[in-house]
Image (cartoon, helix red, strand yellow):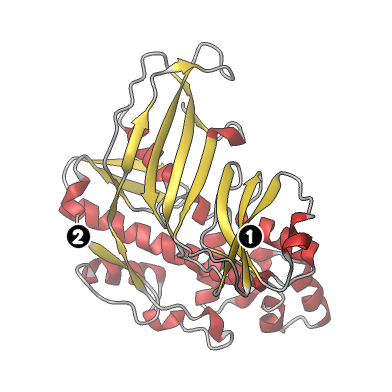
Amino acid sequence: MYILKQIPEDFIVKEISNVEIKTSGRYLYLKLTKKNWNTLDAIKKIADALHLKEKQIGFAGSKDKLAITEQVISISGSSKERIQSLAIPNASLQFLGYGDTPISLGDLEGNQFEITIRNLEPRTKIDPITFIENYFDEQRFSSHNTAIGKALIQKDFATALQLIDNPYANIHLQASPQDYISALKKLPLRLLRLYINSYQSYLWNETLAEYSRQHCSGLHEVPYSQGKLIFSDDPTQLQKVELPIIGFGYQETIAPDIIADILKKENLAPQDFIIRQIPELTLEGELREAIVEVKEMKISPPQPDELNPKKNKVLISFILPKGSYATMVIKKVMSYL
């Protein structure tokens, strides 16, 4: 069985940013390089160290924890000198310049990946691919993210809080056992949105899997924590196909029957994504491409794997657009072996 992320150096991610860097502006732009940090925890650590609120630090996308990653962030309410004096283990900040707007989700072109696949049999041969089904992968889901998101959508706030098990929320509930909304508001809004996004991602994966079953040939299944991913030998059959991420007011496009079946199975309606108790969590639907291009893929010749005797390793590099998962590329190329 192949091994990914045996050490952080096996998974290197460099953000391809599209932000305009200036010589002056309200916001400081910095390159955050981190190792063994997920983005949200790193942002929280930086905010605490600078005595800022987390919302004063902007970023374009979440990056893996067990990896070495580079991304551009924005900070308001602090100084270049104060930031450069920070000492955070396994993380560094490089000043790039200034900007007029905070960096927010989506402010990037894509990501460049350098990934080492380990524990390969000596005769293993990996072939390059040019397109990948645009599924969300495990980083989106974690252990309870999907279940928490569904509980929030269903307004089952007690279950959501039980699964989250946050100490600040728990302290509030000890004093006010039925005040679930105030307890949820003890959590960062970004985190609560992440839970709902996770559930939306699961629903989208189910939509794409079923659409692929009905419209593609040369199918094979790959299990993952939320069910099964369906890959096609010829994903170009899905070119120009956009499927809706279900939310309030999502657009019914080419898969209304598939989505209707999924909503029935989940006991949901689109209006359930309206959360009047916390309006900031009401999320609209959007369209997502069924496949994306894998650019500049390069695969090194097999080399001896120093961490796994008698096995080989291979280095794969490529570029993906924003919002797509490098681990999904690895899942697909390895599923053919």
Q: Amino acid at mark 2?
A: Lys
Q: Amino acid at mark 1?
A: Leu
Helix, strand or loop at label 2? It is loop
Relative image position of residue 123 (x, y in whole percent):
36, 14
Mark 1 lies on residue: 40
Q: Residue at x 66, y 83 (%)?
A: 181
Mark 2 lies on residue: 240
Q: Is residue 32 above or below residue 150?
A: above
Circle on res. 107: none
Question: From the viewer's perspective, is 323 left or right of 213?
Answer: right
Callout 2: few (<14), some (14-19), or many (20+) C-alpha neighbours within 10 Å? few
Callout 1: few (<14), some (14-19), or many (20+) C-alpha neighbours within 10 Å? some
Q: Nearer the viewer, residue 116 or 143?
A: 116
Question: From the viewer's perspective, is 13 left or right of 173?
Answer: left
Q: Hey, which residue is sitting farthest front in the picture?
A: 23
Res 244 → quadrant: bottom left
Helix, strand or loop at label 1? It is helix
